[in-house]
Image (tube, coloured by chain):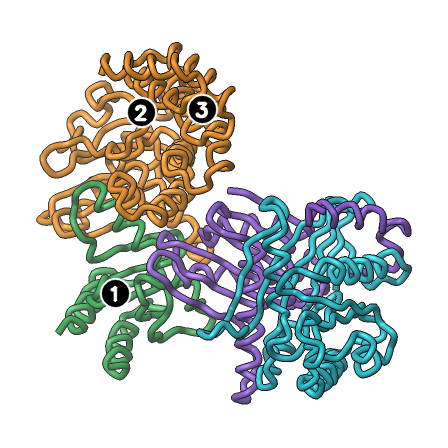
Chain colours: A green, B cyan, C purple, D orange
């Protein structure tokens, strides 16, 4: 299992501009597996990305929009992306401003789907 | 180490009841618990085995009220008496401000008392505390048993009380001597706080 | 939310930690189980007992670590149906301290651990290194002691 | 009910120290006779000062009168006497929720359920609060399932400023709120066309706070947009100036890039409007 998780992260990290990617336990906000560039704070990203995803899910539920599949936080210095995978897992990626978000999103969704299979 | 807060004028002290298995340490706490009004005590916690032997400790917080202008709180603990629980005994002993040694007055328990007392000394030494500076009182429990089964307080004094510490005959099951023992250890611990170089933690 | 502090230096970092971690209750205690400060929802909790038990868990798991030749565990986490508890040690100039964090489903162990790190650093910064070397109680405390013990036992 | 009132009054006349006063006062309160209810409960409490139910009713009356501080004191008193009093815990939960302390409210409701797992209103209220997630504003309404006094309602959706006129979904899919989670303009409807603006606004304030914190801790700086793809819609949230947020909801069929453009236009309109108002 962990081999497959890591393989997925490697694919995601090949997208230009990605500084780190990880599998995170959605409920606990803890890293399950990660692939990070030097200086990227994995623990903080895992905890905060899971919390953000949960709050966004709460807001989506409040508007009657159903379950959230993908969240993207765009900020001055980069982007934080979260894809919801089955089994209480999240795929989280941190990217700088140059990233092709469309491509990265595609890789993350593919990984989430592969985890379901 | 006693916790002293000069801002809120509060003192918190930890008292540990020590002694061999089944000497009546838990019974002491149970009696105190049953006699103290609800607003002066907290929850009594007993970590016991299924057969009601103390596994880790019993815990009883008491509010002694105001002493010399300080709100004074005592936390009473017991240790498990059985020999093989020494690791947990050491943990409970950590940070104690005073110790009550509850001896079993039965003649056949004399060796157990001696072993437990030695064990107390060894554990205190291990924790880096000088036993001569640690307030300690003795209680000779089960004095209500038939004469032929027990040693008298004088005999127990001779056998266990090398340092001439305060010692009290007791029948903890019926509450005899429980109060006197607690009062004595409280006084010893507080006396230390009224002396210079008390070692209390100031905040 | 209620706060009570025995040692005032701990209050500011404590309140910040509770807020950041989204905790229900945080208790700072000594390894002997004495409460130094607490902040959060205490209605359902007997604080003194919680502190005694928290310190005991840390002490016994530390002793167990030693048995298996391991260094003392830095932190422990237990997940329940509605609450989780996080217990962790931190060293300060005041001596070693233990922090009990009780949290609900509105936060996560990840957030608790993240902000505990900051809290431990803040405690280390704020803690004083002082012990009293003067008498605490007046010499004639015994009359007070007699009176309060008598009332305690309703004698 | 009138029969009950006269029956209880008679009981009380016969036995002035009877505990029937609490029930009588509660019946009067429910009929809106607050002054009479207050008189009955205060008289009863002078005879039974340690009667937790009496303090609970007293708190409800104060809450109905809008005197939340007195209500808090009375509920606290009830809890001092009976720490697990379900009514008082729910009351405290209501007050905490009103103050924007959803976490405190959740903790109090948790305790109600620990004592009485069968308390369905408390369970429903707890689930709703947990779903809406934290940082609920002072104006947010506690879930209707909870038997509590109603706090003042914000403007009904019809009277909110129509600043998004001309936008597709101006009153159903675009919401302008401030950082505390209070609705400023627009609205969101849920399944079945119900107005869910308040719940959405409360939840969004939490999202915004978490986005700011994540930006700060991860070193991303200030956040610009949050996009979420959900089962039935795409959502975009963006800050409007320093103190407001806009939410737009688009159909799943709308490309995410287009949804983003739409949100930027809504944000610009909102910003111009807020600046025009000197807000």
Nearer mark to the viewer, of 3 and 1:
3
Q: Residue D241: in sight, yes or no?
A: no
Q: Report whether D44 appears left or right of D119.
A: right
Co-location on one chain, circles 2 and 1: no
Tell me the quarter of the picture where residue D106 sits.
top left
Please say if the residues under marks 2 and 1 sit with CB atoms less than 8 Å apart: no
Residue B15: x percent and y percent?
A: 70, 64
Residue nearest the viewer, comparing C98 with D242: C98
The disc numbered 3 marks a residue on which chain?
D
Residue B183: x percent and y percent?
A: 77, 57
Q: Report whether C102 appears left or right of B144.
A: left
The disc numbered 1 marks a residue on which chain?
A
Q: Secondary structure at mark 1?
A: loop
Which numbered marker is on residue D150?
Answer: 2
Residue in the image at 36% along x and 52% along y: C106
Co-location on one chain, circles 3 and 1: no
Which numbered marker is on residue A88?
Answer: 1
Marker count (numbered): 3
Q: CA distance from mark 2 to mark 3?
A: 12 Å
Residue in the image at 49% along x and 25% along y: D48
Counting other residues with Cα less than 10 Å from the Cα at mark 3, is it few (<14), some (14-19), or many (20 or more)? some
Rendered-image quadrant of the N terminus of chain D: top left
Disc nearer the start of the sequence (2/3): 3
Residue at mark 3: D68
């Amino acid at each position: 299992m962990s081999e497959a998780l890591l393989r997925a992260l490697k694919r995601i990290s090949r997208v230009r501009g990605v500084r780190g990617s990880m599998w995170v336990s959605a409920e606990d906000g803890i890293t399950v597996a990660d692939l990070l560039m030097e200086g990227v704070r994995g623990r903080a990203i895992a905890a905060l990305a899971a919390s953000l995803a949960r709050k966004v899910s709460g807001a989506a539920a409040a508007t009657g929009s159903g379950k959230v599949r993908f969240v993207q936080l765009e900020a001055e210095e980069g982007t934080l992306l979260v894809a919801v995978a089955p089994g209480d897992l999240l795929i989280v990626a941190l990217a700088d401003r140059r990233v092709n978000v469309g491509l990265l999103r595609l890789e993350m969704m593919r990984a989430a789907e592969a985890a379901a299979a | 180490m006693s916790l002293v807060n000069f801002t809120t004028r509060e003192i918190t002290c930890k008292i540990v009841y020590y002694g061999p298995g089944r000497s009546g340490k838990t019974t002491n706490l149970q009696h105190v618990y049953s006699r103290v009004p609800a607003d002066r005590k907290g929850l009594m916690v007993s970590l016991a085995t299924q057969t009601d032997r103390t596994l880790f400790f019993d815990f009883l917080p008491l509010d002694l009220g105001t002493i010399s202008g300080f709100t004074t709180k005592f936390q009473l603990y017991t240790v498990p008496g059985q020999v093989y629980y020494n690791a947990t005994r050491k943990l409970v002993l950590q940070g104690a401000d005073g110790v009550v040694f509850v001896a079993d007055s039965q003649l056949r328990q004399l060796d157990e008392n001696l072993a437990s007392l030695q064990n107390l000394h060894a554990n205190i030494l291990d924790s880096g505390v000088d036993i001569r500076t640690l307030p300690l009182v003795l209680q000779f429990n089960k004095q209500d048993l038939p004469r032929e089964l027990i040693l008298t307080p004088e005999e127990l004094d001779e056998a266990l009380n090398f340092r001439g510490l305060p010692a009290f005959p007791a029948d903890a099951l019926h509450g005899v001597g429980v109060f006197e023992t607690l009062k004595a250890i409280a006084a010893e611990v507080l006396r230390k706080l009224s002396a210079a170089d008390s070692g209390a933690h100031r905040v | 939310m209620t706060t009570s502090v025995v040692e005032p230096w701990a209050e500011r970092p404590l309140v910040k930690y509770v807020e950041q971690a989204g905790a229900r209750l945080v208790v700072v205690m000594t390894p002997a189980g004495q409460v130094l400060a607490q902040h959060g929802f205490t209605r359902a909790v007997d604080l003194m007992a919680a502190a005694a038990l928290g310190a005991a868990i840390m002490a016994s798991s530390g002793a167990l670590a030693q048995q298996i030749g391991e260094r003392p565990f830095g932190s422990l986490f237990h997940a329940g149906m509605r609450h989780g508890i996080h217990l962790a040690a931190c060293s300060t100039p005041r001596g070693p301290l233990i922090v009990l964090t009780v949290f609900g489903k509105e936060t996560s162990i990840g957030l608790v651990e993240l902000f505990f790190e900051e809290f431990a650093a803040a405690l280390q910064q704020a803690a004083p290194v002082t012990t009293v070397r003067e008498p605490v109680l007046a010499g004639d405390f015994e009359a007070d002691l007699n009176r309060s013990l008598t009332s305690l036992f309703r004698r | 009910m009138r029969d009950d009132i006269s029956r209880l009054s008679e009981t009380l006349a016969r036995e002035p120290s009877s505990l029937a006063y609490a029930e009588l006062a509660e019946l009067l309160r429910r009929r809106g006779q607050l002054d009479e209810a207050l008189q009955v409960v205060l008289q009863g409490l002078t005879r039974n000062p340690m009667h937790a139910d009496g303090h609970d009713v007293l708190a409800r009356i104060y809450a109905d009168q809008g005197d939340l501080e007195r209500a808090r004191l009375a509920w606290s008193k009830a809890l001092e006497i009976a720490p697990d009093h379900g009514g008082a815990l729910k009351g405290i939960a209501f007050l905490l929720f009103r103050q924007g302390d959803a976490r405190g409210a959740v903790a109090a409701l948790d305790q109600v359920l620990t004592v009485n797992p069968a308390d369905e209103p408390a369970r429903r209220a707890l689930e709703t609060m947990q779903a809406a997630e934290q940082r609920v504003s002072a104006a947010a309404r506690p879930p209707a399932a909870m038997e509590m006094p109603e706090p003042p309602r914000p403007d009904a959706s019809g009277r909110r400023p129509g600043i998004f006129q001309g936008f597709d979904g101006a009153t159903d899919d675009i919401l302008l709120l401030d950082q505390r989670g209070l609705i400023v303009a627009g609205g969101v409807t849920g399944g079945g066309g119900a107005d869910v603006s308040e719940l959405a606004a409360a939840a969004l304030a939490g999202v915004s706070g978490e986005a700011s914190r994540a930006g700060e801790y991860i070193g991303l700086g200030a956040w610009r947009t949050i996009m979420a793809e959900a089962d039935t819609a795409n959502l975009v949230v963006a800050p409007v100036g320093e103190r407001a947020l806009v939410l737009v909801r688009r159909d799943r069929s709308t490309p995410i890039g287009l949804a983003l453009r739409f949100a930027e236009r809504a944000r610009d309109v909102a910003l111009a409007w807020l600046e025009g108002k000197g807000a």
